[in-house]
Each structure stands twice: as structure tokens, then as C-alpha cells.
Amino acid sequence: MVEAVRQTGVRLYIAQIWALSTIVNEHDEFKMFLGENSEPRVWETVHPSFTVFNKRTETFANIWAEYNHDFSTFHEAALTRMNSERSETQMFPMGDPPANVFNVSSLPWTNFSAFNLNVNTWDHLSPIVTLGRHVEKSTQLCMPLAFQVHHAAADGFHVGRFITELQTLFDDCTWLSAKEI
């Protein structure tokens, strides 16, 4: 995927976010939330909420972009959003995120074998995905990925399927240049 991204000129982080969003939106267990009376419900669509790094202040801003199944449309909207919010110094420059988001962040400076964010609420059912720096191992390019999800919404089977489907999208990158996948 990294080589395919280089050939197309799109942003790798946005391509990763789109791929994550595509898989998340294909499975109800990753779109769950608790309704008014704490009953499990499923969003029709969830959107990625992701971080952008301000190099000057060495801080992050959390922004989001509306998910679109068409990669080109999503890439353009996410790139515009990233460019307009990159120099922000507030954690949430766009205001509070909508309720139907899942979280993505990237640590492209480091490789890791585990990463955990402690969300201070029992009802946070949305996935939290953290990406790391990709490195070459033997003949493969590997990228650390931490995937957290509330056990009430999903378990290891669902996470394993997510990772398999994500690898499939990364292996066949025809979507990078397709109008519709």
C-alpha cells in the first residue's frame, strides 16, 4: 500500500483512515452505541475522528471528516479539513465531535508492540485505533496497529476479522485510483 500511495500522490494517513473507516462501517459491532435507556443501538454510519499534529506547538488537534465510500471524495474532504486545522492549538478546534464517530490516531515516529488509551467512561463502545510507524521486516512492510473496542460490543473474533479485512484492502489498492469501489 505504501508504494501504491507513493505512485498516486495521495496522503498515506488519509488512505489509512479511509480503509479503517470502510471496515468499521461494514460491521454493526463497530458502530454500536447506547441509546437513551442504555439499550444497544447501531449507527447507520460512523465517521472517523482523527488527530493532526501541530509541529510548531508539538500538540495534537482532534478533527473529523464525514466518511464517504468513494475514496477520492473522502480524500479531498479529509485533506481540506487537515490543512485548515493543522495549525490549531485547541484539542477540539471544530467543537465537540458528533456522537457517531470512532477514533483514529497515528504515532508515525515510533514502532510499538502495544498501545492502550484509557477512556474514562463505561459506555464508550466505539473503536479506538492507533497506528504506528511502518518498518520493513524481511520482505514485508509492517505497521503496528492497536485496536481497542469495548468487550460488550465486540470480541477477539470481530477484531481478527477486522484486521484480516484491513489487510485485504491494503493488499489490493485499486481503490486508491478508482472512482467507486
Image: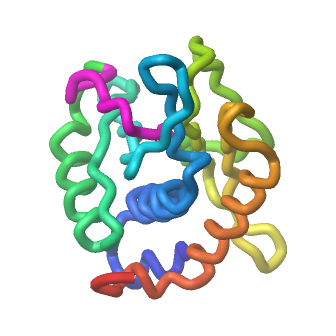
On the question of residue 47 being in view, the answer is yes
Q: Position of residue 150 (x, y in %)?
A: 67, 32
Please report the bounds of the magenta region as a residue range: 91-105
What secondary structure is the magenta-colored segment mainly?
loop
Residue at (57% x, 46% y) in the render: 30
The residue lying toward the viewer, choosing from 78 and 45, is 45
Q: Position of residue 133 (x, y in %)?
A: 62, 52
On the question of residue 54 being in view, the answer is no
The residue lying toward the viewer, choosing from 98 and 60, is 98
The residue lying toward the viewer, choosing from 36 and 17, is 36
Q: Is residue 116 left or right of residue 16?
A: right
- Above or below residue 100? Residue 145 is below
Q: Is residue 73 left or right of residue 60?
A: left
Q: Position of residue 134 (x, y in %)?
A: 64, 59
Q: Is residue 149 left or right of residue 51?
A: right
Q: Quadrant of the N terminus?
A: bottom right
| Quarter occupied by residue 90 | top left
Task: Residue 92: say if magenta.
Answer: yes
